[in-house]
Structures are given as structure tokens and as C-alpha cells.
Amino acid sequence: MAPEDTRSDTAAGHGGAPPGRTTGAWVTVGVLLAVGIVVPLLVFLYDQEKPTLWGFPFYYWFQFALIPVVSVLTYTAFRIAERATARDRRAHGLGPAAGRKGGFQ
Amino acid sequence: MTGGVHGVELAIFLFFFVLVTVLGFVAARWRRGEHLESLDEWGLGGRSFGTFISWFLIGGDIYTAYTFVAVPALLYAGNMIGFFAVPYTIILYPIIFVFLPRLWSVSHRHGYVTPADFVRGRFESKGLALAVAVTGVLATMPYIALQLVGIQVVLEVMGIGSDQGSWLGKDLPLLIAFAVLAAYTYSSGLRAPALIAFVKDTLIYLVIIVAVIYLPTRLGGWDGIFSAAKTSFGHANTAAVAAGKPPSAGIIPAQPLHWAYVSLALGSALALFMYPHSLTGVLASKNRSVIRRNAALLPAYSFLLGLLALLGFAAVAAGIKTDNAQLAVPLMFRAMFPGWFAGIAFAAIAIGALVPAAIMSIAAANLWTRNVYKAFINPSATPKQEATQSKLISLVVKFGALIFVVALPNEFAINLQLLGGVWILQTLPALVGGLYTRWLHRYALLVGWAVGMVYGTWVAYLQPSAADPHAHFGSSLALIPFSQTKGYIALTAFVLNVVAVLVLTPVFRALKVGEGVDETHPSDYHADAGDPGVRDVPLDEPGAAATAG
């Protein structure tokens, strides 16, 4: 395998950057996303009626509350991933990723 | 119950329907590249969509008649499991975040338009690519069928296409709607649903916001809605017990139902991005960041989906009585709102079904053309022949969906979509597994796919519906073998699939069965727009320049 093959979403970049430089960032991304996937599936945490909020049983408002929470987790993961990607790309002598210029058109 | 045709309501509905039809045909000129004739232009809109358009487009894929008709129908009927749609769309986005950027990158390096393209390139297996392609086309049909049921429901409530009278009188309006959809999809490709999605989402936001703010004030607040639902389901349970049946209605799932809830959410979330239409929207985005940013922005739609689901309870509280639970929410709009607003609501629901139906049929057609027609039937097809083939197959797929509407029980149309999920999930090991590792053996993946498909289809076939004990494909839940727990058939079949792949891969490797040549390179999985070798069009169409973006 060629040297530039080692860059992956879980492993750190090689070459220009010190090894392990973005590992922590990618682990953080993984943990944030894992929380967002696992917690909504733990039905025993929220299969109750009380306490109600604005008339919504706990079961329902808890799941609604998870939507912005997971959204924030995902957005945080996005920001960390963007920075880590930029570092990984510099380490491989690539220019800034296209998305850094903004995606609206 | 439907009570004849209402003039204002119908006029408003027709106004919006004609508007989107005109937009659908005009779309052919919108943001147009040099050659609409090529498959990439027709099928992926030139792959130039940024965050804003992608957000609408992907939302259009995800929030459909499924959301407006199928899910609330379950809650109306006292089946609280239907709220699984909320955790499903919550966990979807972290899942998207992980693997779709890899697929975007490798697809743009190699000009892949379909998941089967990737599988063929990664595993050098035309057989596996064929399996993925055929599964994609097959699984899309019941999903489109759900959309058609959604349109049918709205037309029935409006008193056109009522259940009385001849077959033609019943289905003619649906067939007209269907023909219009087919015609503009044929001429404009993905641009049609992308442009219409703006109208659709504007209408839908309007309807939902008015509904969720206004309806509770009429129905004693959310408190009143939940307690009315609880009381009504309590009576239903008492009646069920008196009739010798187990009580099943309620607003919170009891412990034995937790796995059904979790498996439906997880199975649906894993399955969604295996569908060719979801991938079409993703591949059409401009770069990797658009995908990840969308993963954080799309949950705005989940909130609406949850509130829409609860309209099922609101219909109970509003005293709507109907044998067809799918009519409950449209009937409530008629009962609670003036005719003009009911017309807008019905237009929103119908257009909300048309847009995804168009996207789905385009994606299934691309899949067929690339991976069946070009791979097996006419390898030397010109780009123009490919585009023609795709257009024709998009019609065939829609007719296939009509067959599902007619042949399968559709008192709960969500089962149609969930049946699609049973099939499409069996392509996950090859697609997602392939994005991360080359260790899995192509023949093990093929056998695993076959195991999952046969088991899933057979078990689904055995499920009667609640209304008819002799029906087939009546439920998407079944007992997990050797247990007393019910779960989503797709997930059980998927586990068997993965076990077969993991057991057989070492066997095929030990027997030194050829594993094929991988045409992808590890750096392909991270490439972004502007990197060397990343391109907007497939190799076979160098003349089709990307649209300005």
C-alpha cells in the first residue's frame, strides 16, 4: 500500500504531521456519534408517563428533547471533523477541502 | 364518511397540483448542464447541489406519505410502536455522518452513480453488483407503493376516487396523478423533484405549523389530546378483552414491545441509506462537508415528523371515526379547518408523496441501467441509450409499485415500506462493509445476501394482517427464532446475513477462491471536491461538463 493510504477516519495521518495528531479528534467524533445512536434506543430510560411537560407524557417529550440534543452532538462532531480533516489534509500536502469555502450557492 | 366533493378544497388542491406539474416540466431548463441526454445529468442533476438545495432534496426523500399518512395511522389505531419513526430519524443522522462521506468520495473518484457500481468496483463481482442492483429496484417498488397509497387516501377523502363505483372510477384520479408524475420525471429527471421540493416543503411547513399550534387549542391542549387517546384506547382494550383478544392499544409501549420499537428504529435507519434514492440525493451534493453539515441540520425535519405522528392521537381526540386508519388525519383536517386550508393540507400531502416517488423511480432506473442493462444486456450502450433506458425503466418501476398497491394488504401502508426495508437491508454488508474493509469475501457476501433475502421474504410472507388471518405480508414484525420476542424482520434477517458473511469469508479464503481485484484505492475514501481525480461525471461522458455551482 502506498504511504498516503494510511489516512482513515479513525487513524491519524502520516507524513508531514506528527503521528497521532488527529487521533483524539476522531475518537471524540466517534464518541459523540455513538452517544447519539445508542441513547435513543434505550427505551427503558424513558418508557414512563410521568413527569409530563406541557401535556406531553415523559415518553414523548423525552424523545422530542433528544432531537436537538443529538443534532448538537452531530454538529459538534461536524466541526471537530472539519478541523481534523483540514489538519489531515495539510499533513498529506493537499489543499483545503472544498467544503471549507462554504456550500451555499 | 367522505361526504362528497368540496368545491373550495378541490379547487385549491388542483391549483397546487397544476403548479407543481408546470414546475416539473419547467425544471428541465433549471440550472441545466450542457447535455441532459447523459445519465449523469438526468439522474444526478449534474451533482452540483450545495447545502441549501441538498437540505431540501434529502428532506424530500425522507419525509413523505410515510410521515403524513402511514405513521399517524398507526398511532390513530392505538399502535404506539408507530412512534419508532422518531428515534429512527434521530439515529439516522449520526449514522449518515459516519459512512456517507466515504461513499461520496469513492463515488466521485470513480464516477460511480449507484451503490452497485461501487460494489462491482470494490469486489470485482458482477454477480454481487447484480444482487445489489436487483434488490434496490425491488425494494424501491413497495416504498413507491406507500406513496401511491398516500395519494389515494387524499383523493378518497376529497371524494374523487371514492371506494364506491367501478374500478376505473376508483383508481382513475390516482392513475392521472401517476401519469403526470411519470411524464415530468421522464422529461426533467432529478431537477423536477428538486424544484418541486421547494413548493412541497413550504406547504408542509405551513400546514404542520398551523396544525400543531391550532389543533391543540381546539382539542384541550396536548394534555387533552393525550388523555383523550388514553381514554379511547382504554375502551378499545376493554372491548378487546371482552371479545377474548389481548389488549393492545395504548400510548406507551410495554416492556415486551421494546425490542419491536428498537428494531424498527434501528432497522429503518440502517436501511434508509441503502435505498438507491437516498444515495442519489447524497451523491448529488457538491462535496463531503455538505453531507456532514446536513447530518446536523436535517433533524429539524424530525421534530415535524414527531408532531405529525401525534396527529394520529389528535384525530382520536377530535372524535374522527373511520375503519381505515389512514384516512384519519385527512378527515381531521377536513373537520377542523375551513375548506381552503384543508385543500392546502391535502395538496401538501399529495405533493409530499409525488416528490419522493419521482426521486425513487429515477434512482431505481439508474440502478437498472448501469448495473443490469449496461453490465449484462448492452455493454456498448451510448450515453444517450443509457438515458433512454433509464427513462423507460422509471416508468416500469412505477407500474411495479402499482402492482404492490393492488396485490398486498395496505390497511397499514407502512408495512409496504417496511417490506422494502427487509430487502434493502440485505445489501448493507456489501456496501458499508466494503467501504471499510476488503477482508469480506465477495462470495460470502453473495451467500449472506441470499440467506437474508430468502429468510426475510419467507417470514414476511407468513405474517397475516390483523384484518385478515389468511393474508400474507400483513406485518413487518415477527417472532425472533427461538424466542418469544417480536422484532422487525429486516433486522433478524440482517443478523443472519452478517453471520453467514463472517463464517463463510474465512472458508472461501482458506479454499483460495479468487477474491477479485479492488479497483479502488484507500485514498479514494477521503477525496474531496477539487482533489486530483475527483470528477463530476463518469468517464464515458467526458463532454458533459458540470453545471456552474
Image (spheres, coloured by chain):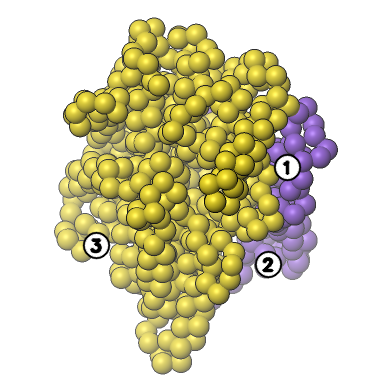
Chain colours: A purple, B yellow
- The residue tagged 2 is A11
Question: What amino acid is at disc 3?
Answer: Ala
Residue at point 41% right, 90% down? B512
Counting from the top left corner in percent of width and height, residue B280 is at 41, 45
- Are dots 3 and 2 on a single chain? no
Query: Based on the displayed image, in which of its 4 quarters is residue A92 positioned?
Result: bottom right
Q: In this view, does B182 lie to the left or right of B113?
A: left
Q: How crowded is mark 3: few (under 14 residues within 10 Å), some or many (20 or more)?
A: some
Q: Is residue B457 left or right of residue A97?
A: left
- Residue A59 is marked as 1
Distance from Cα at disc 3 to Cα at disc 1: 50 Å
Q: In which quarter of the image is the N terminus of chain B?
A: top left
Q: Residues within 10 Å of mark 1 (few under 14, many from 20)?
A: many
Q: Answer with mark 1 or mark 2, whichever residue precedes in sequence.
A: 2
Q: Is residue B171 left or right of residue A56?
A: left
Frontmost of labels 3 and 2 is 3
Frontmost of labels 1 and 2 is 1
Residue at point 56% right, 26% down? B315
Query: Based on the displayed image, in which of its 4 quarters is residue B251 positioned?
Result: top right
The answer to which of B329 and B50 lies nearer the viewer is: B329
Question: What amino acid is at disc 2?
Answer: Ala
Question: What amino acid is at disc 1?
Answer: Tyr
Residue at point 62% right, 33% down? B232
**SS at badge 3:** helix
Counting from the top left corner in percent of width and height, residue B195 is at 40, 26
Q: Residues within 10 Å of mark 2 (few under 14, many from 20)?
A: some
- The residue tagged 3 is B375
Residue B316 visible in the shown view: yes
